[in-house]
């Protein structure tokens, strides 16, 4: 099966110190326009960037951003995106700030099918707290729902969010759970992780023999200006090869064809799942002692 998939990277439409409601409306309107463009190009599934309908507010530690969180799936953003998905007959991955209950907040991505049905959500597991301006532990509780894979008409879809991509364990879990396409919506800046951007996710794709769609926002976000979000959203195949890439500095939609048959072709050659030895990967205290004795 050949799937047409889209990645949507955008810049901030307003300064981050503009009224919150204005920022949210501008970012949402921009995203919907790109979703419609993706659908017009024949895309069956589209993924938005991390925290798509606002700035990357983790650049500061300020409680006012807690007001940005909403329920998933019962909040207004997911309800709106369900309508957008149904109207455009497109599967959507929608990353938002989720409030489970007062004081318990997650970095979450909802998955919606082409009929507007809410399929479920993924909550970001790995939460960074580091310079320059990635103060996420101030805002997010670590995910607690595992690594779900969602059966859709465009294949079996998994989600990994931004900083998660530095951890191969979750990427493997998604593969073991049957993912064929893994989307990673992100917000990352030049000088911090750019050299890893085209290294880690192709490695996950090759090690787990699935497609990866990596999304990054673009531009700088005033007043913080923690760095340049360098775009370059891309798709890579089960061999770890990047075969479609967006620009560095422009809001745009990237649409590409993913031939899911490549997964079978690659796994027929490289039997990584057959040849795994999970029983040998745990270092017991006895094994450590034995190695010490040998020395």
Image: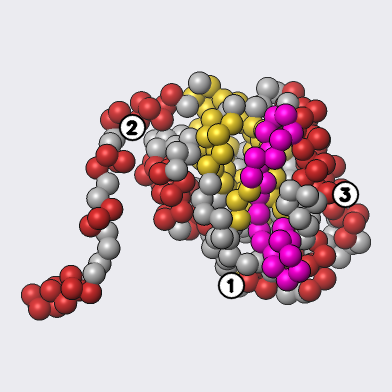
Question: Between 265 and 242, which is closer to the camera in this rendering?
Answer: 265
Residue 242: x, y in percent? Answer: 49, 37
- Which residue is at a point 23% across and 74% down the rendered structure image? 285
**Front: mark 1 or 2:** 2
The quarter holding residue 59 reads bottom right
Q: Nearer the viewer, residue 146 or 249?
A: 146
The residue drawn where x is 42% and y is 27% is: 262
Name the residue tied to disc 1.
130
Q: Main secondary structure of the magenta part?
A: strand
Q: Which one is closest to the eye, mark 1 or mark 3?
A: 3
Q: Disc 1 or 2, which lies upstream in sequence?
A: 1
Query: Is residue 141 shown left or right of residue 199?
Result: right
For label 3, the SS is helix
Is residue 2 on the magenta stretch? Answer: no
Image colouring: secondary structure
User: How busy is the neighbourhood of tag 1: few (under 14 within 10 Å), some, or many (20 plus)?
Assistant: few
Residue at mark 1 to residue at mark 2: CA–CA distance: 38 Å
130 or 89, nearer to the observer: 89
The numbered disc on residue 25 is 3
Region rendered in magenta: 98-120
Q: Which residue is the site of mark 2?
A: 267
Q: Tell me, yes or no, whether the highlighted magenta stretch contains residue 119.
A: yes
Q: Secondary structure at mark 2?
A: helix
Q: Dot 3, how many residues are within 10 Å of its Cα: few (below 14), some (14-19), or many (20+)?
A: some
Q: CA distance from mark 2 to mark 3?
A: 44 Å
Q: Earlier in the sequence, mark 2 or mark 3?
A: 3
Residue 200 picture location, percent across and down: 45, 51
Q: Quadrant of the C terminus?
A: bottom left
Q: Give the Cα separation between the discs numbered 1 and 3.
A: 29 Å
Residue 270 visible in the shown view:
yes
């Amino acid at each position: 099966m050949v799937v047409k998939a889209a990645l949507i990277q955008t810049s901030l439409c307003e300064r981050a110190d503009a009224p919150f409601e204005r920022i949210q409306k501008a970012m949402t309107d921009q995203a919907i326009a790109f979703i419609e463009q993706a659908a017009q190009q024949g895309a069956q599934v589209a993924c938005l960037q991390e925290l798509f309908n606002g700035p990357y507010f983790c650049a500061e530690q300020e409680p006012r951003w807690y007001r940005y969180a909403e329920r998933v799936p019962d909040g207004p953003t997911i309800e709106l995106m369900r309508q957008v998905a149904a109207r455009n007959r497109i599967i959507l991955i929608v990353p938002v700030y989720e409030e489970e209950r007062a004081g318990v907040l997650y970095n979450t991505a909802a998955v919606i099918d082409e009929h507007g049905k809410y399929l479920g959500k993924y909550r970001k597991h790995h939460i960074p707290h580091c310079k320059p301006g990635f103060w996420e532990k101030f805002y997010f509780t670590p995910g607690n729902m595992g690594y779900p894979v969602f059966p859709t008409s465009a294949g079996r879809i998994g989600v990994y969010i931004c900083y998660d991509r530095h951890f191969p364990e979750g990427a493997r879990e998604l593969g073991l759970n049957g993912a064929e396409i893994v989307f990673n919506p992100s917000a990352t800046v030049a000088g911090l992780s750019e050299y890893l951007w085209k290294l880690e996710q192709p490695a996950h794709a090759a090690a787990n023999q699935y497609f990866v769609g990596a999304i990054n926002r673009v531009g700088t976000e005033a007043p913080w200006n923690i760095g340049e979000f360098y775009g370059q959203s891309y798709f890579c195949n089960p061999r770890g090869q990047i075969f479609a890439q967006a620009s560095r500095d422009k809001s745009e939609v990237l649409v590409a064809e993913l031939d899911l048959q490549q997964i079978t072709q690659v796994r027929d050659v490289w039997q990584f799942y057959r040849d795994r030895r999970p029983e040998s990967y745990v270092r017991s205290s006895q094994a450590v002692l034995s190695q010490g004795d040998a020395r």
